[in-house]
Amino acid sequence: MRGETLTQLLREETTKSSPRRKGSDLKRTTNGTDPQTSLSEAITHEKLEGEKGTHRTLRYASVCWNLLRILGRGRVLVLLALVFVLLGPAIVVVRHLTGSITQDPPLYLRYAPDVTVLAEHSQFLDWKQFPMLVPPEVSAFFHVGELITGSSLSLNGLNEIYRVLVALLMMLIGANVLPQTRELYGTLFTLPARKGTLFLLHAGTLAVVCILLFGVAFVLNAAAVILTKGYDPDIFGLVFNIHVLLLLYGGFFASLGLAFAALFRRRGVALLAGVVAIILVISILPNFRNAMYFSYITEHAHEMRLAKRGGYLPDDPVYRTIRALTLTPGTSYTRSMALMGYDVRFPESPFCPDPECSPGETRWQYLNRVRIALVAMSLGLMALGAAAFSRKEVS
Amino acid sequence: MRTMIKLTGHFFRKRLLSGRNAAFLFVIIGVLLAGALVQQANQQRLSNYLGSLDGQEEGFVFPFSSLHPGSGRLNAWEAVNGTLQLSETMLGGALFLLRAMTPLLAFFLLLAGLLYAYDMVSSDLETRLMDSLLGLPVDRRALGLSKAFGETLALALTLAVGCMAALVTVSVISGLQWTLQQMIRTIIFLLILGAYCFLFVLLGMWISAIARSSQKALWICSAVFVAVFSVHAVVENAASLDRAHLPDFPDLPREVSQHFEDAKIRGYPDSDWLPPEVEAYFAELDAYSTELADFMRSRYRNERWWSFLSPPGLLIEVSGPLLQDQYYHVLDVFYSPEHERRPASLGASLRQAGPEIVWLGLLCLALMALNIRTLTRLEV
């Protein structure tokens, strides 16, 4: 960052856009005080002149525009965003060039073939009949070998790469939207708007940034897929759904960054807390959930089999906790991506194969539940941020 | 020398008792404990399943797996993991748990090291503490070395305590037994983990010194993390750019398939009494396996140098031979006939990981030298 901040840019912008506030005129308006502190008075003066509605809209639009400019001027953030949007097409092209995904996975044999073992599993010798891998059009997006999240990290699929990259990038962007120093807050709070409105403006701008970023990522990824593999409406729809999920997943971490920036005075502390929260959300929680899940299904194998056949789901606190943890962003993201990949491989059976899904629930119903949970958690974080922001006092 | 020891002790104590160190300890224990518990639970579940199969007295390793065409390193890594995991007798013990966590640790320690050190120098500059420090009658190089050693010793101690606490907790909870060799391998790997983390602490410290502002250093460290992450992702994917073709898997003839179906009903025949077509098919499989093993060996030899471009790849490459006690060489996982199998040896594993360990050490030394140079020329 070069140090440009919201208020400095607001000052520049206001000074440029309004002839009345230039140079000596501005000094005259503020009665000889420092011109840099006169922004709110100038705006109040405008307000008194009438034209309330138009000016308010322009003012808010100006705040949004300047926020976008701040993000635009953060060179590191721009660099990270560029890495994010270009990495997808790069991986898609590399996968295309290598042609590395085959439809018929071969097998390796470790020992000299043992007749009993091979015969026991002879169906695997004829593995070619099973479409085990996703179609090459979207193979860059899915690393389908591993459904367990958090415990391992493979960077061979964009789903795994984005799981870490999007969380970090969006948290950094979210934490960078609010002002960082007491002085800047002081100037911001002199604007004739309620704190809630100001926070809403920042949150709205953040939402715009998220949509723009993921929109660009979608366009580039879709273009790369179409250029390398040709147009297919189903594949196009799948790539779109992947980016909707990414947007909501990224939105959660952006809200987290924004809330932490409002909660903590120093940006460094907010960022460190954000990184710890990311590790907790994308690694520790999914792992604990998996550990609980594995030990639970070992103990309740019979009930789980019944539930899978459309029977009942266990209704006890442990199982409810496991199901709730499945909707946390780290797990729900990986599950949803895996189910989307599964949907491509097995479109004829639309039901969710995971016993944690409700009986008879389709994969897309589960996905919608995940989307709603992500939006609800983001809104919760925004509310937390708004509460912290509205309590901010500048002495 | 005495002053240097005193200064090192001061920086060590200051960092060890800091809130950031406590947070680091909490996170490292949380990450390792959670990962190790889930892997252990998963492995236990698979062991129970394999143990429940009829006719398998000693348990077996599945003789098949999907391959990633073009990637010898990835295939060797996953094949060894599969061997350790898909076993009734819990092969690998705690080594497997640490192994399963290594890809995650490679990125976690990278981030942790950078975040640990991003304000090591800049905060002293910002709070003017550096003025006082440089005003002391101590050589600047000694000061820089003391700071680097003291702070990283605190980090190393925290890391070792966190790792051991997590592994011992999992062992106690799950009743996991460690052999002496597994314990030695674990300790060696923890030392290498310390060196890996040290590398990024040194990098963070250097960034802190040249940025002179904590905010700026934090941004640069974030960018470095994302850059390393992206480079590793691209290297992993680009490793398969060589479009060498995997040998074709021999098709399963209908009569052989029919033979297996019959065997399932009537019981398995002794291998001495196999029909000729089944014998012929097994000979084909044998040839295929040998060809595949040769292919993987040549790919592995070429690809391992790719890991020198990416520090997380370096750590994963070191952990490949070190965190397993089943194979003399990790590539033995691909079709090693019984007469060629050699017992797992710590010396062989260390020799195999030698170039990567040396490269890691050289990187640490280079960054150490860079830090000392920057700190001695630091202007206040």
Image (spheres, helix red, strand yellow):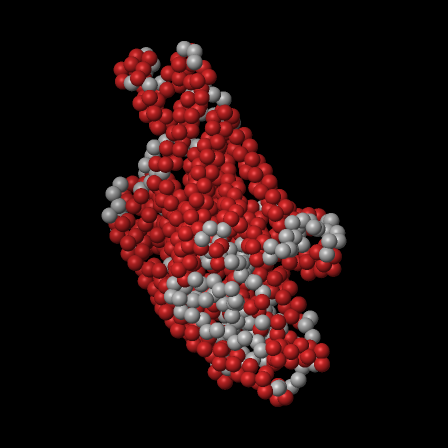
Residue B259 or residue B208, whichever sits in front: B259
Q: How many marks?
A: 0
Is residue B61 found left or right of B188 in the rendered image? Answer: right
Q: Residue at x 45, y 53 (%)?
A: A230
Q: Residue B170's spot in the image, x, y percent?
A: 59, 60
Q: Please indicate, yes or no, whether residue A78 appears anywhere in the rendered image.
A: yes
Q: Residue at x 51, y 48 (%)?
A: A233
Q: Residue A267's spot in the image, x, y percent?
A: 42, 37
Quarter containing the N terminus of chain A: top left
Q: Is residue B112 above or below residue A124?
A: above
Residue B7 or residue B87, whichever sits in front: B87
Is residue A303 found left or right of B161 in the rendered image? Answer: right
Quarter where residue A14 is shown: top left
Q: Residue at x 37, y 41 (%)?
A: A78
Q: Residue B317's spot in the image, x, y percent?
A: 42, 65
The extreme bottom residue here reads B272
Q: Residue A20's spot in the image, x, y percent?
A: 31, 15
Q: Is residue B359 above or below residue B114?
A: below
Q: Residue at x 42, y 58 (%)?
A: A96
Q: Is residue A275 above or below residue A30?
A: below
Residue A395 or residue B309, whichever sits in front: B309
Q: Please indicate, yes or no, whether residue B14 appears anywhere in the rendered image.
A: no
Quarter containing the C terminus of chain A: top left
